[in-house]
Image (cartoon, grey):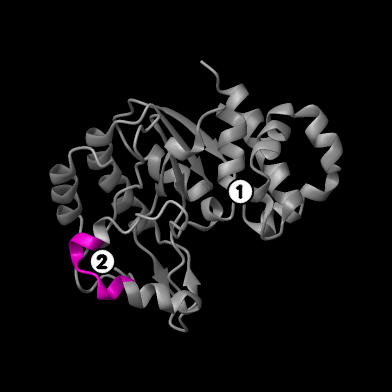
Amino acid sequence: MIPQKDKLVEICKAHILSKDSEVVIREPYVPFIPEGWNGVLVLAEAQNLSKTNSKYVSCLHDLDPLERFFRLSDPNNLGIQPWDDGSLKLAVQSAFNIDINKTAVSNSIVWSQVKQNGNNDNPSNELMKLASSFWNDLLSVITPSIIVTSGKKASTVINGIKTKQWKHIQLRLPSPMAMSRVSGMFPEKELLSRYPEVEESLNKNPEWLNGGYRQNKVFFACHAVTVAKTNKA
């Protein structure tokens, strides 16, 4: 389901970066919005379009601009790592008790940068400002009720928007490096006994723990539950 698709296309066209921009793909893209959208929009930081993902980058270059606007089309493989690997799915399901299949997903920074050697690079401050401008226009059309950002950069982009008509929940970034530093401090059994919401989500969707980093995912989900409870209206 893509609400007011023509308006979203106009917004994307207005935010295509210039040819001299230091980004991999100049076109921005709209969120994946499922049928029966529940009004929750989850935003990670940015796609990794480095040389390690060259096959995906090549596919993007083969698309026309309109197709690149709507590149987030496969709910089973959106190209948003913390969502695809189950980390954000488990966290958001546990924190809000919603149908995760009816949740919208994207990245806050809708362009990606790489270093001269082809490795992934952190988005520049200027790119984050451009992302805030893009979302300012886009959110006036899709109007979510809750925005969940994951990571400091994602939060900064959304906090940079002047007009806010949604509730903003700010989570940490579930990167393996960051989570692994702290997740082992608490046994999984102890965490699940204190966070039944997470245990219930896991029992219903054990596949979200596939691919490794089980302890990280459980710990991050507990963090999300705590943040959501703290920010209840």
Q: Is residue 52 left or right of residue 107?
A: right
- Give the image quarter of residue 197: top right
State the predominant SS element of the stretch in magenta: helix
- The reply to whether residue 164 is visible in this rendering is yes
Q: Residues within 10 Å of mark 2 (few under 14, many from 20)?
A: some
Q: Nearer the viewer, residue 161 or 71?
A: 71
How far apart are the alpha carbons under marks 1 and 2? 28 Å
Q: Residues at badges 1 and 2 in contact (C-beta under 8 Å)?
A: no
- Give the image quarter of residue 55: bottom left
Q: Is residue 47 left or right of residue 33?
A: right
- Mark 1 lies on a secondary structure that is helix
Q: Which residues are magenta?
A: 60-67
Residue positioned 23% across, 34% down in the render: 140
Q: Nearer the viewer, residue 164 or 126?
A: 164
Instruction: Look at label 2 and name its amino acid.
Output: Arg
Task: Report the residue marked by disc 2.
Answer: 26
Q: Is residue 144 magenta?
A: no
Q: Nearer the viewer, residue 132 or 112?
A: 112
- Mark 2 lies on a secondary structure that is loop
N-term mark: 1 or 2: 2
Residue 229 in the image, given as x and y percentages of width and height: 62, 23
Instruction: Look at label 1 and name its amino acid.
Output: Ser
Q: Is residue 63 magenta?
A: yes
Task: Report the residue marked by disc 1.
Answer: 87
Residue positioned 17% across, 48% down in the render: 11
Q: Is residue 121 left or right of residue 23?
A: right
Residue furthest to the bottom in view is 117
Residue furthest to the front in view is 204
Q: Is residue 129 left or right of residue 214?
A: left
Residue positioned 28% across, 37% down in the render: 139
Residue 146 in the image, given as x and y percentages of width and height: 42, 29
